[in-house]
Amino acid sequence: YFWSSWSDGKSKITQKNGPDGQFSVSWSGNKGNFVIGKGWSTGSNREVVYSGEFKPVGNGYLAIYGWTTNPLVEYYIIESYGDHKPSDNPEAKMKQNMTSDGAIYEIMTKKRVNKPSIQGTATFDQFWSIRTEKRVGGTVNTGNHFKAWADNGLKLGRHNYMIVAVEGQDSSGEATINV
């Protein structure tokens, strides 16, 4: 499995890269941003099966998360979140909803200007699918989301990594995930 860990250095994080597809993270301090997870060095259409616990206090996301290049895109398939629903954002542009794996997902896009990326500080688009009923554990067919994004005019580039990720934003919490 591919392991990825990024932090802006402001959160107090304890992380563990466990055996096989298992990882855990606990965080505190109610400040800073991090994204930690495990998956594949190259994203693709795949059935991602995962399980575990996700307990944010404040804002956090549990997502299938990845990047493409040319164009540079950061994407999220949100399975669960803390206090903040990603679409509750004035910068979010909502697209048509989609259904996958027995659930409705909202699709949205957002522009990021001069933000951290896999290519350093850059300006790029984010693509989001947000599960309307939160859950922790199950199957996610990533290809369904990639196709729905394309049908909405949201074009991915060449796949970089794709992980099951835990993100914390100015919050605290703990998570243990098995991919």
Image (spheres, helix red, strand yellow):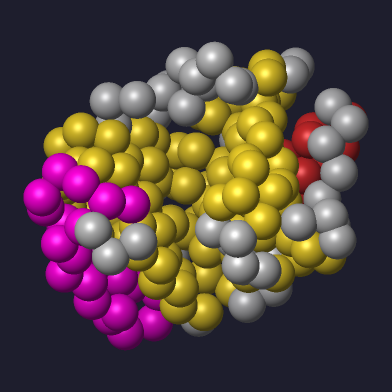
Quadrant location of the C terminus? Answer: bottom left
Q: Residue drawn 83% across and 36% down?
A: 154
Q: Is residue 80 left or right of residue 143?
A: left
Q: Which residues are magenta?
A: 11-33
Question: Furthest-left residue in view?
Answer: 29
**Type of secondary structure dominating the magenta stretch:** strand
Residue 108 locus on image (x, y percent): 66, 26
Q: Is residue 47 visible?
A: no
Quadrant of the image occupied by residue 129: top right
Q: Residue drawn 11% across and 52% down?
A: 28
Magenta-span inclusion, residue 44 = no
> In the figure, 133 relative to 24: above or below?
above
Front in this rendered view, residue 141 or 150 = 150
> In the figure, 82 relative to 50: above or below?
above
Q: Residue drawn 31% across and 43% down?
A: 169
Residue 34 locus on image (x, y percent): 35, 57
Label tally: 0
Front in this rendered view, residue 153 or 147 = 153
Q: Residue drawn 61% across and 67% down?
A: 120
Residue 110 locus on image (x, y percent): 65, 31
> In the figure, 133 relative to 126: above or below?
above
Q: Is residue 72 left or right of residue 128?
A: right
